[in-house]
């Protein structure tokens, strides 16, 4: 009998597997792991697949997921320093850019906060579209 748990080849009269001590009540001679008719003498047939069917992309290859854009931290900082609202337009936040334009960067407070936040971001930083 062949053990379904470990694949051990046991005698036909054995009640438990000699290798893993699993009960052999449901075991039958030859199972999906073994092919006794091919002359393998009870040894397992091992199929090794060297090709992966994995279709996920590694983000380290330079491809970003759809809807994500990379922005340069230093360009945003320069735009924040020398324009009132350029960094918001650069990030694609058009409504906030227009608000900053008409309110002077939320009266200067918004520009200072954005500058501090930009200094703490990694380069490049990523935004959702």
Image (spheres, rainbow, N blue to C red):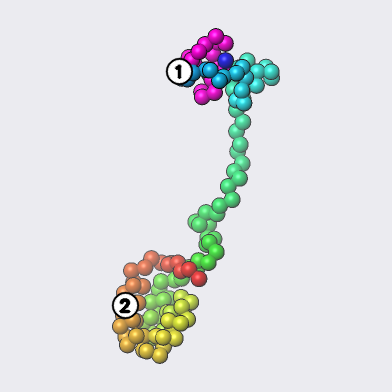
Q: Which residue is mark 2?
A: 113
Image: magenta residue range: 2-18
Per the model, the C-alpha gap separating discs 1 and 2 is: 67 Å
**In the image, which disc is placed on residue 59?**
none
* Residue found at the very far top of the displayed protein: 13
On whether residue 103 falls in the magenta region, the answer is no
Asked if 56 appears above or below 115 in the picture, the reply is: above
| Residue 124 spot, x, y in % from top left | 43, 67
Which of 8/58 is in front? 8
Q: Are marks 1 and 2 in contact (CB under 8 Å)?
A: no
Magenta part mainly helix, strand or loop? loop
On whether residue 17 falls in the magenta region, the answer is yes
| Residue 35 spot, x, y in % from top left | 65, 21
Residue 79 appears in view: yes
Residue 86 appears in view: no
Q: Which residue is mark 1?
A: 21
| Residue 67 spot, x, y in % from top left | 53, 66
From the image, which quarter does the N terminus lie in? top right
- Residue drawn at x 44%, y 71% as measured from the top left: 72
Which of 101/11 is in front? 11
* Residue found at the very far bottom of the displayed protein: 102
Left or right, residue 112 beside residue 36: left
Asked if 51 appears above or below 12 in the picture, the reply is: below
Which of 128/112 is in front? 128
| Residue 93 spot, x, y in % from top left | 46, 78
Asked if 83 appears above or below 126 in the picture, the reply is: below
- Residue drawn at x 61%, y 45% as measured from the top left: 53
Asked if 2 appears above or below 55 in the picture, the reply is: above
* Residue found at the very far right of the displayed protein: 38
Left or right, residue 119 beside residue 52: left
């Amino acid at each position: 009998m062949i053990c379904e748990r470990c694949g051990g080849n046991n005698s036909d009269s054995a009640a438990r597997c000699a290798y893993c001590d699993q009960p052999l009540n449901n075991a039958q001679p030859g199972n999906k792991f073994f092919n006794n008719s091919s002359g393998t003498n009870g040894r397992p047939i091992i199929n090794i697949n060297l090709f992966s069917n994995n279709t996920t992309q590694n983000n380290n290859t330079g491809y970003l997921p759809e809807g994500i854009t990379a922005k340069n931290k230093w360009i945003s900082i320069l735009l924040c320093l020398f324009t009132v609202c350029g960094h918001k337009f650069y990030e694609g936040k058009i409504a906030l850019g227009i608000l900053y334009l008409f309110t002077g960067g939320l009266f200067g407070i918004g520009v200072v906060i954005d500058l501090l936040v930009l200094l703490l971001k990694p380069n490049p930083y990523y935004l959702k579209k």
